[in-house]
Image (cartoon, rainbow, N blue to C red):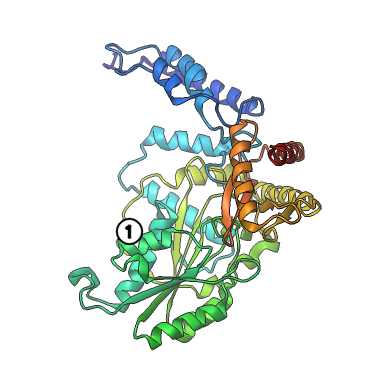
Amino acid sequence: MSIQGELPPDQVRLSLHRLAGWVADQRDKSDEQRVVPDVALDELADVLPELPPEHGEKLAAILEDVERFVVPGLVHAGAPKFLTDAGAPSSVAGILGEWLTVALGTATPTSPTAAALETAVLQWIRGALGLADGCAGRIETSSATGTQRALGAARDAAYADARRRGLTGAPTLMIYTSAEASESVEQVATTLGLGSDSVRRIETDGELRLRPAALRAAVARDVHARLRPLAVVATVGTPACAAVDPVPAVADVCADQKLWLHVDASRGAGLALLPEGRWVLDGVGRADSLVLSSQAWLPLPSQLTVLYSRRTELLECAEGHGLAALAAWVALRALGRVELEARLREHLRLARRFAEWVAADPDFELMVPVTLPVVCFRARPAGMRDDEADALNETLAHQLASSGRLYLTAARVGGRIAMRVAIANVLTTDSHLADAWTLIHDAFDRTLLD
């Protein structure tokens, strides 16, 4: 019996087999593609009709158009010289897990199996990263929503009537975070009704980590001004340079001042997968809440974000997330701890090697030491002013991306413009980085000659 709008079972199998083969072919030739497209938007507008067809077209024809028109116009995150961790490619296991999730229903109502998968994944991640057993968790849609839930709980603990009456008549509540932390802290403060002015950006040290002494002084000044310090957001892996704040010392300040400590480890927690990297989560056992992501250590199509806390009120009345944990469950089983550790060590080795090339070149400089598989560096010939170096590096990042052969980003690091290379693709090798370094040098030489 045929179903209106659906393929017969034999054609379903044929189409899915063809799609699987097409995906495998795309991965095989990822090194041959331009990383950044040279297709203009108006060119695509000419080939994509304004209205859908009156009658359904063959999937084979649609896939051919994907090959001809869609693929050439994409930035290819799967390419080995796509050197950023934003949108990094997933593993085959991650892709299969995502397909299973879609096939079984991403918005499936809460069910025993979905709940059991979520519990298992939360426990596996907690154990793999060495988090305390008493630390309960829940899945969040993003690190920003996890931070919002945590700081919302801190607000409610400080001012119990906030949810019922709003913040009218409440004291001015203050949040403290590093000058290098995510801009989402201000966004969360605004959403919670505290306002972006409630966020104090604390100065950093030479390695761009939050300075505990500066934090303590800022809290003291606000208390003297009759403001009410509420919470500190420490960061393990800042967005630009992957700096790791000294969480134990920050926790001391929070304990002395009775402040809520939230740790945003969405970018850096994965390093704790390595025994030699467990130090990045030192002190988080004293935090009230911790958010982390699968980014850069568990290759999934959609990042999995988890909020852990020893404050059970944060995790009460948790809404179901359907099969959000299924892709991670599949990937963790298919890859295993040993493979994940090996991947992460290789990414660290590559990042450190690239950093050595930068440090040995008199025309370039490292902005901070390499902690995670991220290298922040900039071109700065002898005698060049900082503002001139800012303009130069912004130009270089744009030129390199426009070339189509390499993708890296510009980032503001310690107030200066730098280039940022992140190793997150298992396909990236020494030869790809060597090619990238040559391309960077060529662009540098051309720019100085112009």
- Residue 274: which quarter of the image? bottom right
Q: In the picture, which quadrant includes the C terminus?
A: top right
Q: Is residue 314 visible?
A: no
Judge whether 35 appears above or below 7 on screen: below
Which kind of residue does numbered mark 1 sit on? Ala
Residue 435 image position (x, y, % from top left): 74, 36
Residue 196 image position (x, y, % from top left): 36, 65
Q: Residue furthest left?
A: 165
Residue 298 image position (x, y, % from top left): 57, 48
Residue at image x 48%, y 83%? 255
Residue 313 image position (x, y, % from top left): 34, 70
Secondary structure type for disc 1: loop
Residue 357 in the figure: left or right of residue 218? right
Q: Is residue 179 visible?
A: yes
Q: Residue furthest bottom?
A: 224
Residue at image x 48%, y 47%? 303
| Residue that carries the numbered disc 1 in the rendered image | 318
Judge whether 172 appears above or below 80 on screen: below
